Image: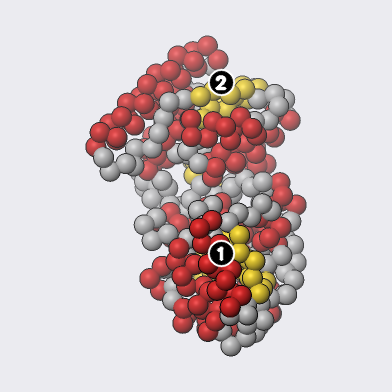
């Protein structure tokens, strides 16, 4: 079977696409992965042996500048025409799109050629690009059991598959909690200033400071935070990048972080309780955090309510009750067989 996989924009769209592509190649399907320039190197470096690559001219339309929006739409239109012509030659049996504006041209071209098309939504609230592309797809696959924003009048089939994660997270799925007082603080690849502002001061206010903190932050904040922790006799390792995120999550008893789709699903895959602080301008993150909190795995805290006083009291209560941390970890655990579910859906 010939399968075209469309991805791009960010690593959050790319890594799930590559996981599915890798398994399809193992099953001896012919796979081509298309992406935009922003993730070209990322896809090229991790492209499964045996899969082909194609590059498209596309970018997000979210810019506030009107000229930038028009230019972005023009690039998407040109890429749609280019892929329509390419599909006339390649004629894939299936098109699988992993969201974002880089997926729109492939979805549109597949619609013109009446190719069965599958779209994956990462977040617990459907994004603008996916909502726009929904009119041209047969099946919407979701990372979360419930996704808000899907039009009620759509006849698209909605299937909960979960979100593919890297193998190192799968290998640590269900790892038992250590109850060693380990706290992980991560704001993602760029850090999160509110975590740097609130967490250290909250730790100082805790009655029980017998915890060890792994704090990922922006490079320019590393020295300042390390000095703060040292001056207040708090054991901490401050760094700008965590190479082994799966191992670090598994070694933690609790995580404080943002609530991007990948972060939440990684927590659910390994099974760790968390305090999630959604980016206040991102409704997707708020929906993801709410879905995680509904499991009983932790707290979804709006940014304006994430205060030093609240956090100090909450951390004190949690680390004084290891049984509660263990219970949160158990409730947060969700078996991840997303790759298998996605492949079963698209090849049946």
Secondary element type, mark 1: helix
Front: mark 1 or 2:
1
In depth, the one of 65 and 290 nearer the eye is: 65
Would you say 169 lies left or right of 63 here?
right
Secondary element type, mark 2: loop
Where is residue 15? Give x, y as percent. Answer: 60, 41
Mark 1 and 2 residues: CB-CB less than 8 Å, in contact?
no
User: Is residue 165 in view?
Assistant: yes
Where is residue 328? Give x, y as percent. Answer: 63, 71
253 up-or-down from 173: above or below: below
271 up-or-down from 200: above or below: above
In depth, the one of 54 and 88 nearer the eye is: 54
Query: Which of the 4 image quadrants contains residue 304?
Result: bottom left
Q: Which residue is mark 1?
A: 223
Query: Which of the 4 image quadrants contains residue 153?
Result: top left
Q: Which residue is mark 2?
A: 92
346 up-or-down from 141: above or below: above
In the rendered image, the residue lying farthest to the bottom is: 207
Picture residue at 57% right of the left edge, 71% below the top:
227
In depth, the one of 310 and 31 nearer the eye is: 310
In the rendered image, the residue lying farthest to the top is: 89
Where is residue 299? Give x, y as percent. Answer: 52, 70
């Amino acid at each position: 079977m010939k399968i075209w996989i469309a991805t791009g924009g960010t690593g959050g769209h790319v890594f799930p696409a590559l996981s599915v592509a890798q398994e399809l190649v193992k099953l001896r399907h012919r796979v081509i992965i298309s992406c935009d320039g922003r993730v070209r190197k990322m896809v090229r470096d991790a492209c499964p042996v045996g899969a082909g690559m194609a590059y498209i001219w596309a970018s997000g339309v979210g810019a506030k500048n009107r000229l930038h929006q028009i230019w972005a739409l023009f690039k998407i239109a040109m890429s749609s025409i280019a892929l329509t012509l390419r599909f006339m030659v390649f004629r894939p049996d299936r098109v699988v799109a992993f969201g974002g504006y880089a997926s729109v041209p492939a979805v549109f071209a597949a619609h013109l050629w009446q190719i069965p098309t599958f779209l994956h939504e990462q977040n617990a609230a459907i994004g603008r690009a996916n909502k726009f592309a929904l009119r041209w797809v047969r099946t919407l696959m979701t990372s979360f059991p419930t996704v808000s924003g899907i039009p009620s009048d759509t006849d698209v089939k909605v299937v909960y598959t979960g979100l593919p994660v890297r193998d190192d997270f799968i290998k640590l799925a269900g790892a038992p909690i250590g109850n060693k007082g380990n706290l992980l603080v991560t704001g993602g690849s760029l850090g999160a200033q509110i975590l740097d502002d609130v967490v250290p001061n909250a730790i100082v206010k805790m009655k029980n400071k017998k915890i060890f903190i792994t704090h990922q932050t922006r490079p320019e904040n590393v020295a300042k935070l390390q000095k703060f922790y040292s001056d207040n006799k708090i054991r901490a390792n401050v760094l700008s990048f965590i190479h082994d995120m799966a191992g670090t999550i598994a070694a933690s008893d609790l995580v404080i972080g943002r609530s991007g789709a990948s972060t939440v699903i990684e927590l659910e895959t390994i099974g760790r309780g968390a305090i999630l602080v959604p980016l206040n301008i991102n409704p997707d993150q708020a929906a993801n955090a709410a879905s995680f909190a509904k499991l009983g795995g932790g707290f979804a805290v709006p940014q304006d309510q994430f205060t030093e006083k609240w956090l100090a009291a909450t951390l004190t209560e949690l680390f004084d009750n290891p049984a509660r941390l263990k219970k949160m970890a158990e409730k947060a655990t969700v078996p991840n067989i997303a790759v298998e579910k996605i492949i079963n859906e698209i090849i049946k």
